Image: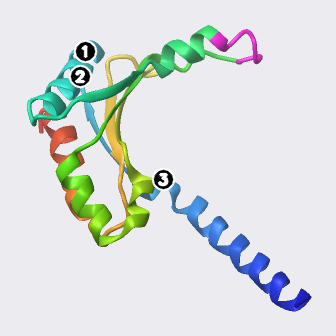
Amino acid sequence: MHLIRSATIAASTLLLGASLAWAQDDVTTYTTDAPFSEVIADLEDAVVNRGFVVDYHGHIGDMLDRTAGDIAGSKPLYKGAEILQFCSATISRTAMEADIGNIAYCPYVLFAYEPVEDPGKVTLGFRRLPDGGGRDAVNTLLEEIAREAAGQ
């Protein structure tokens, strides 16, 4: 029993390490020279114009600025950094009917940021869901929205 538990822990550790190593590969980004405020507005419009509702608008950059002194933040990171969170009943239903475990990917999140160190360059994008299992339509939707907001 101890050998099985040790093997399970070792396998889990290897899988976790592999997931962390791939973490950047699952992020799709686009860069634009448009002002940050326009990019956020364009992202929100791209979501709303498809009939979805933005459930949450997170002001990540503001939170990091506000808390920097409390946690010994060493430098400013963003001129602007925000996330938009939304869901689609239709696409989510399809994905979850294919695999009920796809609930882990809902809601969907888009992000945009303008770094302090590279002002005027706004990066926007999303975390790609694993291919297959009903998730491809989600990736397509997120990619369409991000590309539209990036002007591509």
How far apart marks 3 and 1 lie (CA) works out to 25 Å
- Mark 1 sits on what residue? 35
Local secondary structure at mark 3: helix
Mark 2 Cα shell of 10 Å, populated few (<14), some (14-19), many (≥20): many
Magenta region: which residues? 67-73
The amino acid type found where label 2 is placed reads Val
Local secondary structure at mark 2: helix
Return the x and y of residue 87 as percentages of the image width and height. 28, 41
The amino acid type found where label 1 is placed reads Pro
Q: In which quarter of the image is residue 128?
A: bottom left
Q: In this view, does 42 lie to the left or right of 112?
A: left
Return the x and y of residue 22 as percentages of the image width and height. 52, 62
Q: Residue at x 14, y 31 (%)?
A: 46
Q: Is residue 19 left or right of residue 94?
A: right
- Mark 2 sits on what residue? 39
- Mark 3 sits on what residue? 24
Return the x and y of residue 89 as percentages of the image width and height. 22, 47
